[in-house]
Each structure stands twice: as structure tokens, then as C-alpha cells.
Amino acid sequence: MRTLFVTHASGLTHNMGPGHPEQPDRLRAIERHLENERFQALARVDAVAAPREALLRVHPESYLSALERSVPREGLTALDPDTLLCPHTLEAAFHAAGGAVAAVDEVMSGSADTAFVAVRPPGHHAGPTTAMGFCFLNNVATAARHAAAVHGAERVAIVDFDVHHGNGTQEIFWADRNVLFCSTHQAPYYPGTGATGERGDFDTIVNAPLWAGAGGDDFHEALTTVVLPRVKRFEPDLLLISAGFDAHQNDPLGGLRLTEHDFSEATKRLMDVADRSAKGRVVSLLEGGYDLDALGRSVSAHVLALMGA
């Protein structure tokens, strides 16, 4: 199995200030863990900036232009209390979305079987015209729309296991019958969405909220009874993962109690589903994860599973 690792150095230049949990050291922690000899077989490529047309499938030009006008020459511009632009933020954001596009190209063309895109800023809270929750552009939505427009994917499934609900992704695909969005997340919690009754116009939104303190058994039960059956029935041509590792028991921003073993097992089970209809095609994109050691260990376990190890 050929697994692709996509990243870009611009992710290290996006800095929202001292003490902010979504920090450049997140990427450094991942890189350190993936230097292990177990990852020698990873194919590694640099992300390119997303073409404008790829972003416009998700975000209107008015929003992209407003973001560009908001970039400061120096210092920080706050779009909300947690989501701040520095002079290098949009370069990083365009490369983050571009990494998602590149990974889809490689996997849909058969050049890679699976891919992990380690970029920042993350994306699943970004709506069509809204930046929030550390997110500016919705990377996984860009990947899904690119797969459909360029590679003819008729059905794309997105599974999000971040501790926070991917409200932006849900909003983008609320009325899209060709994209299935499934989320496990802590609730009640930020951003306040993700109830089981939120199902979308075509019943393609699937939420499996977990309570604070829920652990691996609870997470896997949600996968087994709610998420995986819906993905199987949907029969996607491509499976995308919004891989947030802030559901780890050591994460400072979450209240779930998952371990790296839970992320590994979930990845393997999602890959099994992808084997049924999507020829095993899986693209995973980094979302949250703010304890650096837990993040590095969790990503290692996730990538090893993507590699079939």
C-alpha cells in the first residue's frame, strides 16, 4: 500500500500569538514522530497553493477577497476571539487547502492508495463565508468538491472524529445529496451544533454526539451503530477523514478519553469500509489536537493504519 504524506513549511509561519493552542509546534511534533524508521516508506510531497477555482467551489469570491483584505502587514487581526490572522496566515491556509487538493489528485488517480495531509490552519469550522474556531478555509470541503468536479466522484463520504463538531463542513453540505457528513464529537460543547436531529435536506448529515468523559468503548459503539452503517449504505467513491486528535484523553481542549489505539482502530475500520466501494481510497486531513506529545503519538498510530501496518 502506498501512502502519501502531504505538508508545507508555510504551516510553520502561521502564528496566532503566544499561548494560542493552535500553534506551529503542532506540525513540528508530527514531523518528529514521523521521522521514525517505521515511516520510511511514506511518499512525502509538499503542498502547492490551492487554485482559486478549487476554493470557489466552497467559498464565494467576496469571502476570499475579504480575507485577503484582512491580512495585516504586521501583528494580528482578530476575526473572532480565537481566530487570528498574521501576515503569513493566508499563505498557509491556501497551501493547507492545496494539500487537500493534491492528496485527492494522487489518490483518485491511483498514484497513492491513502494520504495524510498534515497542514495548518485546520478547516472544519470554516463555513462558506465564516472563519471561526481557528479555521479560515474548509480544507475537507475543498477536497470533496474537487473530487467531484475534477475526478467525477459521484459520492463522497466525510467522517469527522474531532472532539469539536465540524459545523462548517455540515453547513457546506447540508443541502448536498452527493456528500455524506458523519461526525462523532463531544456535546454539549463548542461550537454548539451537532445534535442527532441535524440531518440535512437529504438525510446526509449524521451526528453521533458523545458526552464529556466518554472513552474508547463509547466512541467505537458510535462508529459501529451509527457512523459505519451509514457510510456503507452510502457507498462512497472516496472517503475523507477530518482527523482531529483533540478527543485524546490528554488533550487540554477536550473532555473525551480516547487513546492513540482508538484512533488506529477507527482508521482501520474506516479503511475496511472504503475497500467496499471506494477501491480503498482514503484521504485524511489534520484538524485538532493540542497536546503535542499526544498529537504526535496519535498521528503516528493513524498514519501506520493508513499504511496498512
Image: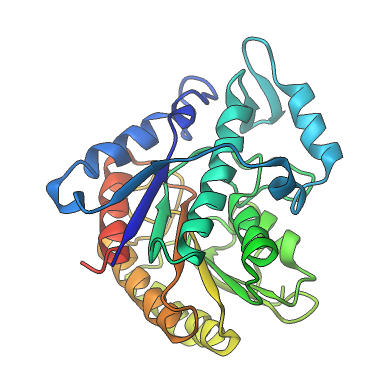
Its colouring scheme is rainbow
Q: Assign the N terminus to one quadrant of the image.
A: bottom left
* Relative height, residue 267 to residue 81 (above, below): below
Foreground of the two, 184 or 67: 67
- Would you say 63 lies left or right of 182 here? right
Q: Percent position (x, y) of residue 153?
A: 63, 72
> Relative to 69, is 269 above or below?
below
- In the rendering, at what x and y percent does residue 56 appear? 77, 48
- 161 vs 278, nearest the viewer: 278
Q: Quadrant of residue 25?
A: top left
The residue depicted at 49 percent of the width and 49 percent of the height is: 287
Evaluate whether residue 163 shows in this view.
no
Question: Which residue lies most toward the right here?
Answer: 62
Given residues 61 and 185, the one toward you in this image is: 61
Look at 36% across and 71% down and name the residue there: 266
Whether residue 307 is visible to the viewer of this picture, yes or no, is: yes
Q: Viewed as shown, does residue 13 lie left or right of 272?
A: right
Image quarter of residue 203: bottom right
The extreme left residue here reads: 37
- 144 vs 185, left or right, is right
The quadrant in which the C terminus is found is: bottom left
Residue at the image point whose x is 59% and y is 59% from the top: 165
Image position, residue 166 (x, y; %) = 61, 58
Q: Residue furthest top?
A: 74
Residue beneath the point at 49% across and 84% down: 277
